[in-house]
Amino acid sequence: MALRTALAPLVVSALLAATPALGSEKLSTQGGCTTCHAAAKKGIGPSWHDIAAKYKGQADAPALLAKRVREGSKGVWGALPMAPTPAAKISDADLNALIAWVLKTP
C-alpha cells in the first residue's frame, strides 16, 4: 500500500506529461494566432468558425492546416498571405491540439 501511495504522484505526472495539450483560446493566444484570428469575427484572417465550416468533414484538414501554419499560405482566404509559424512559437503537439479545437468550433 505504501509503495502504491508513493508511486501515485509519479504516475499522474507521467500521464500528464504524455498527454498532448488541449486546444484552447489560450493556446491560440500563446501561439500568436489571435493576432489575425478570432472565434466568430473575421480579422486579418478568417474566424475559427469560418475555418471550421470550410474544412468540415475533410479527413485531411488537420494535416493540411498544420502544413499551412508551418509553411504559411497564400490565396486560400484572399490576397493577404499567412506568414509561417515556427515550432519555437507553438509546438507540434500544441498546434495539432489547437487545430483539432478549431475544427470542432461550432
Image (cartoon, helix red, strand yellow):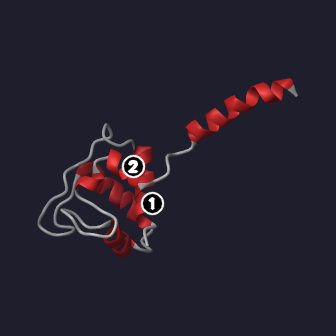
Find residue 1 and name its label.
Answer: none
Callout 2 touching callout 1 (CB < 8 Å): yes
Question: Which residue position is annotated with label 1?
Answer: 101
Query: At x 11% / y 67%, what residue is drawn?
Result: 79
Circle 1 crowding by C-alpha within 10 Å: few under 14, some 14–19, many from 20: some
Q: Secondary structure at mark 1?
A: helix
On screen, 46 above or below 94?
A: below
The amino acid beneath tag 1 is Trp
Q: Quadrant of the N terminus?
A: top right
Q: Against 6, is 14 above or below?
A: below
Image side of residue 105 versus residue 73, left or right: right
Left or right of 15? Residue 87 is left
Measuring from the top left, give residue 49's x and y in whole percent.
Answer: 35, 71
Which quadrant holds residue 67?
bottom left
- Residue furthest left in the image: 79
Foreground of the two, 45 or 84: 45
Using the image as rendered, state which of residue 40 and residue 104 is in the foreground. 40
How far apart marks 2 and 1 lie (CA) works out to 10 Å
The three-letter code of the residue at mark 2 reads: Leu
The residue lying toward the viewer, choosing from 29 and 23, is: 29
- Measuring from the top left, give residue 48's x and y in whole percent: 34, 66
Q: Is residue 69 visible?
A: yes
Which residue bears the numbered disc 2? 27
Q: What x and y, as percent, mark residue 55? A: 37, 71
Say if residue 60 shows up in the picture.
no
Mark 2: secondary structure: helix
What's the residue at 43%, 68% (across, down)?
105
Q: In the image, what residue occupies the spot 43% across and 54% down? A: 24
Q: Is residue 83 left or right of residue 70?
A: left
